[in-house]
Image (cartoon, rainbow, N blue to C red):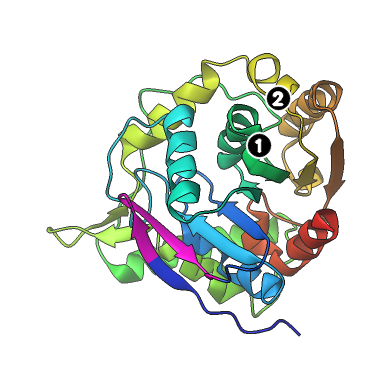
Amino acid sequence: MAESITKNISNVNGISLIDTSEVDLPVVVFLHGLGETKESFEEMFEQFAGKYRCVALDFRGHGDTLMKGPYTIKQASNDLLTVLDELNIRYASIVAASYSCWIAQHFAVEYQERVDHLILLDGGFYEVDSVSEDLSQPTFNSEKALDHHLSEHIQELEDNGVDLTDDIIPKIKDAFKVCYMKNEEGIYEHRTPIEAFKGYLQDIASLDFNKEIASKLNVPVMLILADHSLLPQEFQATNEIDLVEFKRTVKNLYVTRIDKSDHLLMLSHPIETSLLVRSFLK
């Protein structure tokens, strides 16, 4: 059974974060995916209680961090460095989800002495296509409409074969819901502005990431994959090609996967993901 954990929400130079503040313990920093928030890792924090100090932050354009761009990998890395410096954290292990896997790799190359282990949750290994100018996010005219949309999304995950326990479903819904806010007109819209989505994605797409970043990694890396057999065939084939190339590129890489899981592993399978991470850190 997981121990209870005290989470303190604070602000460091404009960056909103959660910190369990257990200063005498090794540190694990959690980085959320694009459009997500630091709260995405709430269920995982409990699995690290008493063993690790947990820190999670909202990147620019996300959650409670009100700072605007530039929305780039380099700026996100610099913001992470600022947080570690302000909290007097000399080095940490990093758990990164989805989009932030590219940020984490960039940070681990630029500031190698600050990273102990690097754990990538189903991201950072595949190529990102150029971003469409028509990229948009849905809006909802009521909280009921938002709830209905989120319920449909979760049902779609289950219909596609993702194994979700009854107790985790409302927590996934809460994690998605906090990504939205009610504007002055009473419309529920995504907290992350569309220019942030485009900026971050365009920055990845502009890089030959394997050559420029991944090949330079010198820390132990674990890649935890979601169950790609649940994806459409064309995505399965592309992901497999990209994975083979990533394995060739990254030294000190361990790859594993969680069956019947979603891309956002920290939401669909927080306990299984935590067990794998803790085992790797040992």
Q: Nearer the viewer, mark 2 or mark 1?
A: 1
**Residue occupying image coordinates x 53% and y 79%:** 6
SS type, badge 2? helix
Please tell me which residue lies in front, 135 or 64.
Answer: 64
**In x, y percent, where is residue 82?**
43, 43
The N terminus - image quarter: bottom right
Label 2 sits on what residue type? Ala
- Most extreme residue toward the left is 184
**In x, y percent, where is residue 38?**
48, 58
> Magenta residues, as a range?
10-21
The residue identified by callout 2 is 214
Q: Residues within 10 Å of mark 1 (few under 14, many from 20)?
A: few
Q: Is residue 209 left or right of residue 188?
A: right
**Residue occupying image coordinates x 79% and y 62%:** 278
Q: Is residue 266 left or right of residue 223?
A: left
Is residue 170 rendered magenta in the image?
no
Is residue 119 visible in the rendered structure shown here? no
Looking at the image, is 29 positioned above or below residue 250? below
The residue identified by callout 1 is 113
Give the image quarter of residue 131: top left
**In x, y percent, where is residue 153?**
54, 58
Please tell me which residue lies in front, 252 or 83.
Answer: 83
Give the image quarter of residue 27: bottom right
Is residue 17 rendered magenta in the image?
yes
**Residue occupying image coordinates x 74% and y 64%:** 274
Label 1 sits on what residue type? Glu
Looking at the image, is 272 positioned above or below residue 32? below
